[in-house]
Amino acid sequence: MVERHSRPHAIVLVLVLAAIGSASCARPVPTPTASATTTLQPTTEPTSEPVLRVDGIAAAVFFRELHPKPGVVTPGDNLEAGSRVYLVAGPVQVDRVDWWQLHSDTNAFGWMPAVERGTATLVPIDPACPDDGAVTVDQIVGMGSLRSLACFGAKPLSFDAVVICLSGTIDGGPGGASWMDSYRWCHTVGTPGIGLYGETITSTLGADLTAGPKVARFRITGHFDDPEARGCWNLPVGVSLDSPGQPEPGAVMACREKFVVTAAKPLD
């Protein structure tokens, strides 16, 4: 009886050993570790599509008229198709449609609906902002005032530039800030250049109102979107640019685009 049952046990033992041997030849499956898990994480932050937002920019899809108030169809400035616009305020919903206040690169200003007859009228744009800590004058010129305002706001910027300052009388237009001068005009050399505002730079001409043009190279520090811009209004001809008045939305936007100089170090 012992001999008759010993063979099946031997056969089972052989099969078990064979199975163990084949398993030892198979490729081992590693046990996940903390370090292995971290390598599976994304290496870049997820990107998001641009959206319509205050202080953002967009492109106009159609030619249309702008209006002085949301939902009020009153003739105003014309907005050309393809114009870039800066979104100043909104959205304000009227009859379940969002309205935005905007300022265009052609100085059109007013309100318009974001959708008309089921079709979007504005397409949001990613301004693709450069590093504000190493921006150059050529980059700012290439960006234009609306994109610069959207990218930098009131952040301090520094750049080197050749500057020309002139004496003359600037009469009428957006004004009402203390850094505006009716008798001085400075800008970076080039076509186009960047207008430079503030006594820090205009004082380089001295006190003589008849002084000839002065050209020099400076390291300029300053900002767009100066707080005083919120008090700007459209001055009639014959009124000094720094005169006080009641804020007007279009003039406020025009002043927000201006670059106010806080430091100017001669480099020549």
Image: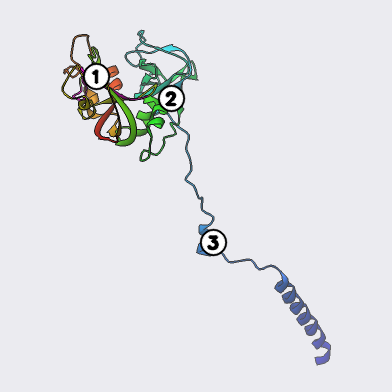
Mark 3 crowdedness (10 Å alpha carbons): few <14, some 14-19, many ≥20 = few
Count neighbours of disc 2 (C-alpha within 10 A) and say few if under 14, some if 14 to 19, many if 20 or more: many
Where does the image place residue 223, in percent across and percent down from the top left?
29, 32
Dot 3 or dot 1: first in sequence order is: 3
- Identify the residue at horizontal 41%, vertical 18% (top origin): 113
Residue 59 place in picture, x, y as percent: 45, 22
Q: Which of 22 and 128 is in front in this view?
A: 128
Q: Mark number for residue 58? A: 2
Amino acid at dot 1: Gly
| Residue type at the position of mark 3 | Ala
Which stretch appears magenta? 177-189
* Position of 9 relative to 66 (above/below): below
Instruction: Give the number of the mark in front: 3 or 2.
Output: 2
Q: How many marks are shown on the rendered structure?
A: 3
Query: Which residue has dot 3 on it?
Result: 36
- Residue 54 makes an appearance in the image: no
Residue 192, by quadrant, is top left
Residue at the bottom extreme of this rendering: 2
Q: Which amino acid does label 2 sit on?
A: Ala
Q: Which residue is drawn at 77% across and 80% down?
A: 12
Q: Mark 1 points at which residue?
A: 212
